[in-house]
Image (spheres, rainbow, N blue to C red):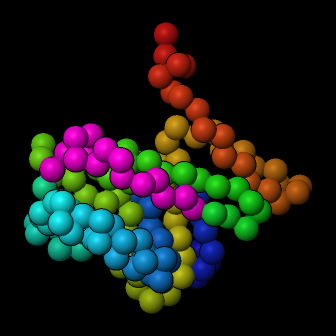
Amino acid sequence: MADDGVVLDSGTAYTWLAQDAYEVLSEEVQSLFKEMLQRHKGMPNQLCYIGSVREDLSGFPAVTFHFASGAQLVLDTLSMFLHIAPRVFCLAIGSSAVNGDSSKNLSVIGMMAQQNYNVGYDIGRKKLYFQRIDCELLED
């Protein structure tokens, strides 16, 4: 596997960002929650908080991943945070540096970030496309 770049992996639940990108996102999330939510200390390598994603994160800003080809992947709260207990949720994005220095510049976009999107690949043109869909409309 490459030591840097971006991989889309629908077999990985979480998203793993290159260390520098993760640090920026992590600091911003902590800053936004600082006065609002209490940090849950049970998961030392993750940003976890006491509360409810649906109740406590109303109005939380979306995070957009911008790709070189111009594609954009917009993550809402349900694509960024995951409940690990009834009143505890964690950021479903981590630093790829947990896998060692050789992976610290690699980002892996997992299935939570890809949920509610059709992903298109134009191999010939080396283009990537994301189309937001409402999965509830697909259910019969």
Q: Position of residue 21 (x, y in %)?
A: 48, 77
Q: Position of residue 14 (x, y in %)?
A: 40, 58
Q: Residue at x 58, y 32 (%)?
A: 133
Q: In this rendering, would 1 be left or right of 57?
A: right
* Residue positioned most to the bottom: 101
Q: In this rendering, would 83 be left or right of 131?
A: left
Q: Quadrant of residue 29?
A: bottom left
Q: Quadrant of residue 125?
A: bottom right
Q: Residue at x 72, y 49 (%)?
A: 129
Q: Residue at x 37, y 71 (%)?
A: 28
Q: Closest to the observer: 58 or 7?
A: 58
Q: Closest to the observer: 102 or 126?
A: 126
Question: Is residue 10 something one can see in this rendering?
Answer: no
* Residue positioned most to the right: 124
In the rendered structure, does residue 53 fall within the stretch colored magenta? yes
Q: Name above or below for residue 8 compared with residue 94.
A: above
Q: Residue at x 44, y 67 (%)?
A: 16
Query: Quarter of the image containing the N terminus?
Result: bottom right
Q: In this rendering, would 94 be left or right of 139?
A: left
In the rendered structure, does residue 129 fall within the stretch colored magenta? no
Q: Closest to the observer: 95 or 33?
A: 33
Residue range in magenta is 51-65
Question: Is residue 21 something one can see in this rendering?
Answer: yes
Q: Position of residue 62 (x, y in %)?
A: 46, 53
- How many marks the image carries: the answer is 0
Q: Position of residue 78 (x, y in %)?
A: 37, 44
Q: Closest to the observer: 2 or 140?
A: 140
